Image (cartoon, rainbow, N blue to C red):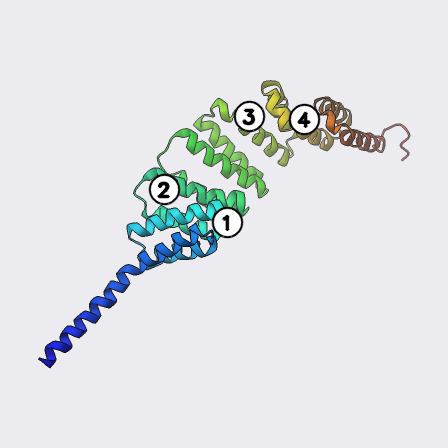
Amino acid sequence: MRYQNKTLILFSMILFFLGCSFSTEELYFEKATNAEKEEKYDLALNYFLKTIEVKPESNLALQAAQRGAFVARSFTEDYGALLKFLRAILLRSNEIDTRIGAQAEIGDIYFEKLANYPKAIEEYSRLLTVKMSSPQKLDFRLKIAKAYYFMGQFKQSEFEINELEKIGIPETKKFEVELMKGNIYTGLKKFDSAIKVFQNLISNFPEKSKEEKVRMNMVVCFEEKKEFDSAISTLQKVALENPDEKDFIDLKIERLRHIKGLQPGAKGFKK
C-alpha cells in the first residue's frame, strides 16, 4: 500500500511538472500580450522571444514571432529583436509569400536601417533564387545595385544594372534605374556617359528630374570635366526651376567662375 502511495505521488509530480512545461509558452505569450496592452513594448518583445525559445516548433511560436515583429516594427527601433522575429517567421511559416516578405524585410533592415550593405546584399541575394514575378526580382536586384554603389563598388553595381536590363525594366521603374545608372557612371568617372543619361532623364521625365534635382548631378560631371561654362549654364536652369534656392545657387555659380578664372589660359592667369 505504501509502495502504491509513493508511486501515485511520484506519478502526480511528473504530471505536475510536465503540465508546467507544457504551459510555459502560453504563460510567456500571455505576459507578452499583457505587456503590449500596457504599452511596455520592450517587456513584450522579451516575452514574445521567450515564447519562441520554449517551444520553437509550435503554432504559438509562429504567432509570437508575427506579433513580436509587429510590435518591434511599429513601436520600437529594436532591429535586433525584429530580425529574430522575422527569421522565426521565415523558418516556421508555410506560406511562401509570407516567407518572401520576411526575407525581403530582413534585407531592408540591413539596407535602410542599419546601413550594413554587405549583409543587405547577402540577404537580398537569397531572394534571387526564389521563383517570383519579374517586377519583384527587379526590385531586389536594384537594391543590390544600390548597396554596391554605396559601398563604392561601382563596377559591380554596373553589372547588377546590366542584369536588370536583361530582365526588362517596366515603365514605372525606368526613371529610378536610369538615375542609378547615371550615378554609377559618375562614380566610374565616365562623365560623358553620365551626362547623356541625365539629359535623357530631363527630357523624358521632366517633373521627376526636377524633384530629384538631376541637373545638379550634371553640374558635378561638368565640373569634373572642367567644363565650367556648361556647369554654370546648368546651374542657372536649376535656379529658374527652384527660385527659393537662388541665393545658394548664385554662390555656387560665383565659386565656379572663380575656379574658371584660375585655370591655365584664363584671362589674367600668370604662369
Left or right, 21 with respect to 145, comes to left
Relative image position of residue 139 (x, y in whole percent): 46, 33
What quarter of the picture does the C terminus occupy?
top right
Q: CA distance from mark 4 to mark 2?
A: 41 Å
Indicate which disc, 1 or 4, sits on the residue closer to the N terminus.
Answer: 1
Furthest toward the left, the residue is: 1
For discs 1 and 4, the disc positioned in front in the rendered view: 1
Indicate which disc, 4 or 3, sits on the residue closer to the N terminus.
Answer: 3
Residue bearing mark 3:
175
Residue 76: mark in rendering: 1
Asked if disc 2 and disc 1 are in contact, CB closer than 8 Å, the reply is no
Q: Nearer the viewer, residue 17 or 226?
A: 17
Furthest toward the top, the residue is: 203
Relative image position of residue 199 (x, y in whole percent): 64, 22
Disc 2 element: helix
Q: Is residue 193 visible?
A: no
For discs 2 and 1, the disc positioned in front in the rendered view: 1
Left or right, 22 with respect to 264, comes to left
Relative image position of residue 233 (x, y in whole percent): 75, 23
Residue bearing mark 2:
99
* Three-letter code, disc 2: Arg
The crowd level at tag 1 (other Cα within 10 Å; few <14, some 14-19, many 20+) is: some
Residue bearing mark 4:
215
